[in-house]
Image: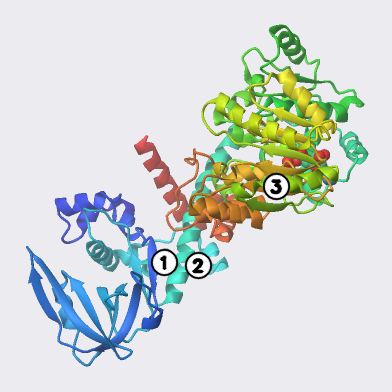
Amino acid sequence: MNLRKISVAELPGVGPKRLDAIKSLGINSIYDLLFYFPFRYEDMEVKSLDDAVDQEKILLKGIVASEPVVVRFGYKKNRLNVRVLVENESVMVTFFNQPWIKDKFETGNEVAVYGKWNENRRSLTGMKVIGSSQQDTIDSVYSVNKNIHQKTLVNLIKLAFDKYQDEIESIIPEYLLEKYQLMDDRSMVKGMHFPNSEEENESARRSAKFREFFLFECGIQSVKAKDEQENDGLVEDYDENYVNKFIETLPFQLTNAQNKVVNEILADMKSDHHMNRLLQGDVGSGKTIVAVIAMLAAVTAGFQAAIMAPTEILAQQHFEKIGNLLESLHIRTSILTGSQTKKEHDTIAENIREGRTNVIVGTHALIQDSVDFKNLGLIVIDEQHRFGVNQRKALREKGNNPDVLAMTATPIPRTLAITTYGDMEVSRIDELPAGRKKIETYWIRSQKVEQMYKFVSKQLANKAQVYVVTPLISESEKIDLKNAELIYDKFNELYAPKYKIGILHGQMSNDDKEEIMNKFSHQEIDVLVSTTVIEVGVDVPNASVMVIYDANRFGLSQLHQLRGRVGRGEKQSYCILIADPKNDVALERMKILTSTNDGFVLAEEDLKMRGSGDLLGSKQSGLPDFKVGNPIADFNILQTAQIEAEQIFKDPQAMENPENKVLKSFLNDEFDQLNNFD
Ligand code: ADP
Ligand code: MG
């Protein structure tokens, strides 16, 4: 019997009106109803009156001390009053509009009542009477709307369970249930709705989470499998010796994490599997060199490689660094940006088209129609979260199915990477180069700004280079500029001419920006006052102090990115946040930043604080909406589910295996439903 095909109207007492009410919760079939799980459980532990906090929901236990009295008032309204002796104190318990509860109070008997505590009146607004035998109990809370009550819903679920429980087939293959000690679907449904114990509920929840994640991952894997069948990737038969030699000549040794991801990437490139890989690594972890190695490999295989960066400053920086690294190998690099003249552009574009340049660095100018590649084999997208899906796709279409390496420091927890970029494989650089010291972060209020000046003086005397960043204060570039200029004047007043102060902002010409950045790189400028144009990617290892004005105006990930401009060398680095947080969230941000340097920890904190947080920017729509599982809190389960789903889909015949029969038909049904909605 397929419970997804049986309407809830089959249940006794469900007429057209109630049917509509249930449908308004998105419940159509018996299956939907049985899998409409509580969104929360109230863990009811008996409280002592001394511990009760005003307006808190608590469970009190005592002896019924008076006959319950029902008082009617208003139209169809009533209230039940009963006194309960709790720890020698007589507490008034009141229930509204539940006169039938009267029967549960018999004078002299023990009773446990769940409700909202009023500290002033020392009284309880009752919500539920619990059998006195239970010490602790769990209360399921369902999300309902104005059309339907909790109680009605619970009763319907009970009816459905009684009638159809034997028809609940387990979708998760038996071997997985055994391997992870999961409940089958019938026991899980029971344990989710009507647990007899905390343990039963725990186990049901764990099973439900696995099930939810697993089915989601099966969906992703089946899409991916299809993608792979239809897409033949490029085989980039690169020169392994050459690449290894290059790695040996680098001025530093790759970290273990860098080595690991380089191997993952190169293996993908060599295989006919189409690479679609996300490289995550915290700011300063050394992603660029990994990209350079991959690009070099592509070139030795006879292909062109392109890297796209979100800002001109960053593109310029990459161009110089990559150029320096590859020059002696006679690999020709070129840069393409929006600020070039038409003549420059045309010459460069022709070189790209004719295959005269091998490695091309650029901004989104790379995806213009006028740009064609001879044989693009590898695309690197730096700071990929700064590009829209379409821009990424457009670059991809410049070649014949080139391999894609997307890089990001946005601290998307791996969990979210798996769920959001399910079609991408994830490589992660999880260590910083040796010798890096923890950036010390301090937060001060603006009235204490003098402290920062003093600190900066000391640092300058120690030959430190300093960034001073001011946020976009308004939509008006002019006002922002004024803000940066005021700070620039102030720093000049304080430190010039002994120290050189520079200013950088979005309204300067690219040549001017480049000149300032070069001077800062070459230590001809000591203090660089800047707007957020330096936010991403900029790499000046000698800079060791980052001062951020109005830090409360930045999001957590942006602050982390900015802070990541320092701590790139062996010097002790500092970050000073000047902020007057105006609410708890802003305050919490300052505290989190001062307590950790780890972008991933930070991201998870932020997510815990506010659901999806602001880390992923405004468009969070890419995140699937899980009902039972929380991709952060339940990371282990998510990961396990992902691995198992992947395992199944590795074998193209696996779905024909009898043990996956129910799973297969479930996924097919799901797919049919998708088609129906289209
Ligand atoms: P990000 O991951 O933020 O893009 P970068 O690639 O800009 O980081 O690297 C940060 C700095 O660390 C650069 O100056 C780079 O040369 C340096 N670097 C990269 N890898 C190593 C390493 N293994 N050992 C020492 N320094 C390294
Ligand atoms: Mg970078």
Report the amino acid beneath label 3.
Met
Q: CA distance from mark 2 to mark 3?
A: 56 Å
The quadrant of the picture showing ligand 2 is top right
The residue nearer to you, when weighing 348 against 477, is 477
Q: Nearer the viewer, mark 1 or mark 3?
A: 3
Residue 611 in the figure: left or right of residue 323 = left
Residue where numbered disc 1 is placed? 188
Q: Mark 1 vs mark 3: which is more N-terminal?
A: 1
Q: Mark 2 vs mark 1: which is more N-terminal?
A: 2
Residue where numbered disc 2 is placed? 182
Q: Nearer the viewer, mark 2 or mark 3?
A: 3
Residue 276 location, quadrant: top right
Residue where numbered disc 3 is placed? 452
Q: CA distance from mark 1 to mark 3?
A: 58 Å
**Circle number at residue 396:** none
Residue 518 in the figure: left or right of residue 142 = right
Badge 1 marks a residue whose secondary structure is helix
On the question of residue 17 being in view, the answer is yes
Q: Mark 2 vs mark 3: which is more N-terminal?
A: 2
User: Most extreme residue toward the top, as rendered?
Assistant: 343
On the question of residue 305 being in view, the answer is no
Crowding near pointer 1: few (<14 within 10 Å), some, many (20+)? many
| Circle 2/circle 1 CB separation < 8 Å | yes
Q: Is residue 316 above or below residue 72?
A: above
- At which x and y percent is residue 335? 75, 20
User: Residue at horizontal 11%, vertical 77%?
Assistant: 70
Report the amino acid beneath label 2.
Leu
Report the amino acid beneath label 1.
Met
